[in-house]
Amino acid sequence: MLLGAILRESGDNEGMRFQRSSGVLLHISSLPSYGGIGDLGHEAHAFLEFLAAGRQHIWQVLPLCPVGYGNSPYSGSSAFAGNPVLISVERLVTWGWIEGHRLDGLPGRAGNVDFEAVERLKLPVLEDAARNFLNQSGEPWMAGQLAAYEAFCAAQAEWLEDYALYAVLRRVFNTGAWTTWPADLRGRKAKAMAAAREQYAREIAIEKVLQFAFDRQWNELRGAAAERGIRILGDIAIFVSMDSADVWANPGMFQLDKDLQPTAVAGVPPDYFSPTGQRWGNPLYRWDVLEKTGFAWWVSRIRRSCQLYDIVRLDHFRGFEAYWSVPAEEETAIHGEWVKAPGAELFKKLEEELGALPLVAEDLGVITPEVDALRISTGMPGMRVLQFGFDSKESHMHLPHRFTVDTVAYTGTHDNDTTVGWWQKASDHDRAAVETYVGPVGGYPVWPLMRALYASVAELALVPAQDLLALGSEARMNTPAVPSGNWSWRVPEGSWSGGLAYGLRTLVEVTDRDNDPMADSAKLAD
């Protein structure tokens, strides 16, 4: 990957600095695609056209993994795989994998995602398309696609083999917990594993084909983005789900007992979002074991992330310095404790193995001087969120006059209410503070706050799509510590107007954020 396309090198010990630019936070599932959920097809490419018209150079997405409990992309069943339901069925028709009439009856483009309906109606169509691909693989016209598929399987075998078998067994045993599988498969005994691979060979191949289709469509989208000078900012959760191929395939890397149950789980202490903290429930790493392997699993994970994204946001960065360890039997996160993590040693090894990396630290929440020191030593930009900046003097670090250049600044994130929803619920004190800072907003705070964001020194200024569209709380993506009803919002059809693109373009021009990374890359090449 050519880092010069998205980064410019700074002085010694300052790591890599990002181009001064702006962009939009919008997850793929939130697009108004046919099939009941956003996908990698026409609407994704149309959104790229809108971004280019508005002279935006960053598209931020949430984790692309297959989702698990609660449909959260931060609780996926694999740290490496793509979510099959994000595959465009319409593009599969053009590839010759399935006939167009098979798409009849799928959910439409309007309305929020009904994850159950998508799994019930869209997933079988995708699986049929994968079967057709395998059945037609001997046809001469399929030779190129088959060669690409075989190359993909060989290149990604390190994770793909375990994930494909895991995904099949998860359906076979109709459970969301691999710890309830038969003992020999739960413990990955060689004889049982070999028998399962033989018995379910066809189903395993289908899972691999779906991953190939996802990868191919994703790379097409990234290529189209690069042509427009747009970089994809991806996101990876620091922890993985207990119900995942990662834990099943690597139980020795995690804090599990002899019965393969977690002894301690991840979370965060009481904070802005929850007075009882957040008990995420993810198993914690055995960092001592990982260190003895040279952090090999993390090297593989970041390598894969850099294959998928141009820039990678590390969610819950503070967990790399110290993590909140909650005894597994606790129902809340109140009675946890901070435990030291490897910090600099991990990032040193990643750089040794992979070179300079385009990483962003999500450093929100309880941040200590040690966490700040780790971020600065690695040269990563940190995050600031305007919504946090107005309720007290201690929160002013989230206001533009306190930003530093190495900042990725947001009006709000996927975990916040929309700016309109936040404004409608804000106290008189907070509203007065906003208007003191940006001037009268007349009940419409989004663009005044965007102007403050864009005019700051922060190298990246990002705005959720919901804020661009001035939508209220009904469009909120996620409410932390609330286990259901999240992640389903979708953009209304026809939202990307020329007038909206014009407004972004003029704002970009006056705040000097029209930095085309492809043009800069070409200059470096000269």
Image (spheres, rainbow, N blue to C red):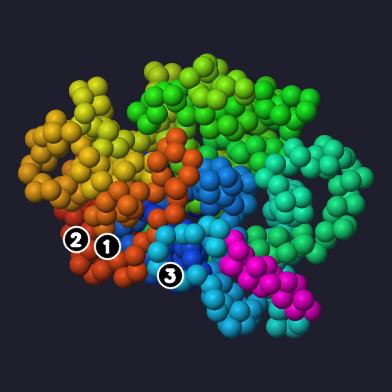
Q: Main secondary structure of the magenta part?
A: helix
Q: Which numbered tag is attached to residue 503?
A: 2
Tag 2 near tag 3, CB within 8 Å: no
For disc 1, the marked residue is: 54
Residue at image position (77%, 54%) is: 172
Please state the total of marks drawn on the protein image. 3
> Residue 213, image x and y in percent?
62, 66
Mark in front: 2 vs 3:
3
Pointer 1: residues within 10 angstroms few (<14), some, or many (20+)?
A: many
Q: Is residue 303 above or below residue 339?
A: below
Find out whether residue 133 is within the magenta segment: yes
Mark in front: 3 vs 1:
3
Residue at image position (27%, 62%) is: 54
Q: What amino acid is labelled 3 in the image? A: Arg
Quadrant into which the C terminus falls: bottom left
Q: Is residue 204 above or below residue 268?
A: below
Residue closest to the eye, 341 or 75: 75
Query: Distance of mark 1 from mark 2, alpha carbons?
Result: 7 Å
Residue at image position (69%, 37%) is: 247
Pointer 3: residues within 10 angstroms few (<14), some, or many (20+)?
A: many
**Residue segment shown in magenta:** 119-138
Say left or right for 476 vs 187.
left
Give the quadrant of residue 382: top left
Find out whether residue 430 is within the magenta segment: no
Residue closest to the eye, 382 or 120: 120
Q: What amino acid is labelled 1 in the image? A: Gly
For disc 3, the marked residue is: 109
Q: Residue furthest right?
A: 191
